[in-house]
Amino acid sequence: MYHNRLLLLGALCLAAVAAYLFTGVKGSLEFALMFRGKKLLALLLIGAAQGVAAVMFQTISGNRLLTPALMGFDALYVLILSAAVVVLGAPAYQQLDPGLLMLVNATLMSGAAVALFGLLLRKSAADMMRMLLTGVVLAVMLRSITGLLQRVIDPSEYAVVQAASYARFSRAETDLLGLSAALCLGALVLAWRMRHRLDVLALGPVAATSLGEPPLRGQRGALLLISILVAVSTALVGPVAFFGLLVSALTYLVLPTHRHAILLPGAALIAGLVLVGGQWALERVFAFATPLSVVVDFLGGLVFLLLLLKGVNR
Amino acid sequence: MSRPALGLLLLCLLFVGSLFVGATPLVPADLLTAEAWALIRDSRLPRAFAVVLSGAALAIAGQIMQLIARNRFVEPMTAGTGQSAMLGLLLVSLLMPGAEIGVKMALAALAALLGSLGFFAITRRLPPQEPLLVPLVGIVYGGVIGSTAVYIAFQIDLLQYLDIWMTGEFSGTMRGRYELLWVAGGVAALSYLVADQFSILGLGEAVSLNLGLNYRQVVLSGLVVISVVTGLTVVTVGAIPFVGLVVPNLVSRIAGDNLRRSLPLTAMAGAALVLASDIFARLVVHPFEVPVATVIGMIGAALFLWMLYGRGQHVS
Amino acid sequence: MIEVQDLSYRIGTARILDNVSLSLPRGGILALIGPNGAGKSTLLSLMARLLPLQQGRITVDDLEIGRCDDRDLAQCLAILPQSVQAASRLTVRDLVGFGRYPYHRGRPGATDRQLVEEGLALFDLLPLAERGLDTLSGGQRQRAFVAMTYVQDTDYLLLDEPLNNLDLAASRALMARLRDLADRKGRTIVIVLHDINFASAYADRVLVLKGGRLVADGPPEAVISSALIETVFETDARLHLVEGRPVVLV
């Protein structure tokens, strides 16, 4: 039904990619392409991860205002990182293989997220709001603990942690690309295979149960995938508060359907378009005045308020 | 001993104890020396007063906000009031850099008021059957205003100031630098005069009107108290989360919801919580210290979760 | 055949169901009646595994609730819960289409589509098929959900107070359709009703619950009596026999 729009989005995304790669090249085209190609890949991965994670999370929580970032998924990531620096010390930490670090971090985070939310789901399956509020407060707590750790360590170590606690699209960690791409694509494939189940889960727990799709199992599976996606994205650029919200809101606007077969790729394409197009505009058109993450947060926040005022909170 | 007297005793002990905690060693035996008195007069005593005043005032502001919102899970610092104060302060620093501290303060409080009005304008549209949606919206609303502030601060290179305002700490408190907090404390204390009217607000607009209350006026005066307290605290010591959230909840379990009776307890408990946290903040990495906001972020969040799950069913 | 053995359910210290045992053979309409808080909805929810079993055992044909595969059960038993959340962006056709999900798991075939069209036609939903659920009236939405449950094509249909949002004509139309399903397709329909007169007019068998216990069971003419109204519902409404069936005068 909305396949034409998906195709259009794909074309726009390709156009943004081409603009990003080929405009304003000074000197060797080959070098520029290689350098930009890595960053481009990172941006596309982050976009797909954040967009798909946000849509999935909103489906299983039945709430259009919440995203993994709001629930503290990336705060958990930064905390694990800070704890590692404190425990190992900055020199030892910097010696570690970043790929290994990311794998360990992603595993710990998925484990923690599934254990935590799994427990909450068992305890208060009917009370999604309470669970979500718990997540938001836990996020504050996690950030406070991270803050405490960061004060305890000495300034040189602090610099190491700080680099990981702020989003920076322009300096994505391209070293980790191969591993990130593998993890991310794996999770995306599994998310795609869940698309029909997500359609049914979106009907609410009662209807899903009645149709033979146990909601707890589906929620747990989705949470696992969401953790992996957020871990990858956070490892690449750091936390992005409102990006997921911006993307999911745009997705529902452009693709007003309940079918995840359309929504999931749509969200990935829109996220890619926003990131690549935005980065292109900032780098080439506005000459780097403001980091993209700040602009994205600002826009995401405005979208949130608009949604709220229009009363779209289901 | 009665509960209030016991609380007062605990508070006094904490207060005196806090005078002897800090980077410069000080024990009661030193009190005979003049340097010790100078240290106490210029640094330790102002700090203790600042802590007590901001703790008490924030707890009262939280209590009033909860009554107006008719929701036990909101507080000014996380629901946009604190962030609005920062935004206002930032704009003042940008547009009128030479303004006097009093003017800055007034404009910060005004921004806080506008921010709270915005919050209540949004929450009025939320479905009443979902009480937990209100604090969620508050936190995100606060986050949005906060990120606006970050955006502006980034543009004009004031990110460092914002960082200071965002994490409350008392390490810089000295004689001559904290006195505005007395105003915050005074405004919070004034609210005791209209405590009954605030109690009635908690029963809702219909009941308030039925009892002949000028609903809008009482709500507005409550918002003024919240905004002044929040604005002044942010300007002098920075944002301290969770005090306004957990203290009124804990107190209302013990003393009920009649403010005439519970407000003094709320003030005491708020002061004691911040005082204890500040002492901890000074001791944990002695002789350095961590911001009190960080300590309260952890303790407060843990208390909040306990409220939500321990007897959470009764507080919504 | 649905078999319920020694079923108890409590929330906190409150006993919602207290040692209920019953067996419902295939076919016919069975009405669950009783005063507010008698445990009717809980019983229905337990049968449909919407609530976890605490004590007792329920089997639906050869499937045991709590142990059997959810998908198998979804092909055997469908429930229409009391309050249905409407996912706003669905059209009526989408919603009814979800009734076939237990069979096709997201890949509808020709038979599935045909059954959906039949369901839409049977419940007069064809003119509304492309409308969004959020644009419908309460009664129309209710009809769409009933149609979805119908399309699920199960032997057992559980409905929790389906007449809640319906006016007299719509209520009678719905009950007549259910009657038809029971008579001509041999479906077994378990329905929670508030209005005793509807139970007496359409049900083959009436189960009366009070305080979590089964207090009466039998055909409506035998069960619904002045004594029942007085002892179970604790009110003194009078009862008349009209054309051979009991009618409560409110």
Image (cartoon, rainbow, N blue to C red):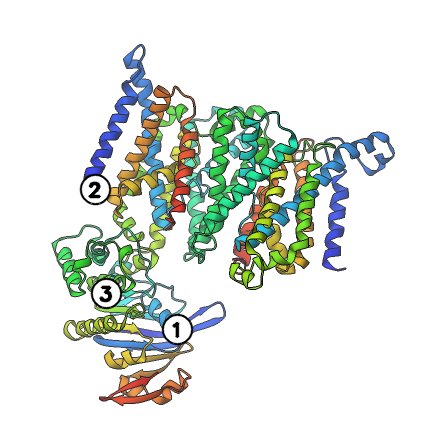
Indicate the position of residue C50 as horizontal and vertical percent values. 35, 63
Please, what secondary structure does the residue beneath circle 2 have? loop
Please identify the residue farthest to the top as the structure is shown. A27
Task: Looking at the image, tell me whether mark 3 or mark 1 is earlier in sequence order.
Answer: 1
- In this orientation, which residue lies closer to the viewer: B50 or B16? B50
Amino acid marked by disc 2: Tyr
Please check whether the numbered discs 2 and 1 fall on a single chain: no
Distance, label 3 to label 1, CA atoms, is 23 Å
Residue at image point 38% right, 63% down? C52
Up-down: is C35 above or below C118?
Answer: below
Dot 1 amino acid type: Gly
Residue A196 on image: x %, y %: 25, 49
For mark 2, what is the residue? A2
Find residue B200 and report its image quarter.
bottom right
Asked if one can make out residue B275 in the rendered structure from this viewpoint, the answer is no
Tags 3 and 1 touching, CB below 8 Å: no
Q: Residue at x 35, y 25 (%)?
A: A279
Quadrant (top left, top right, bottom left, bottom right) of the N terminus of chain B: bottom right
- Give neighbour class at mark 2: few <14, some 14-19, many 20+ (Cα, 10 Å): some
Q: Position of residue B248 (x, y in %)?
A: 61, 53
Q: Secondary structure at mark 3?
A: loop
- Residues at marks 3 and 2 touching, judged by CB atoms closer than 8 Å: no
Whether residue B163 is visible here, answered yes or no, is: yes
The residue that mark 1 highlights is C39
- Name the kind of residue labelled 3 in the image: Cys
Chain letter belonging to callout 1: C
Q: Which residue is mark 3?
A: C76
Per the image, label 1 sits on a secondary structure element best described as loop
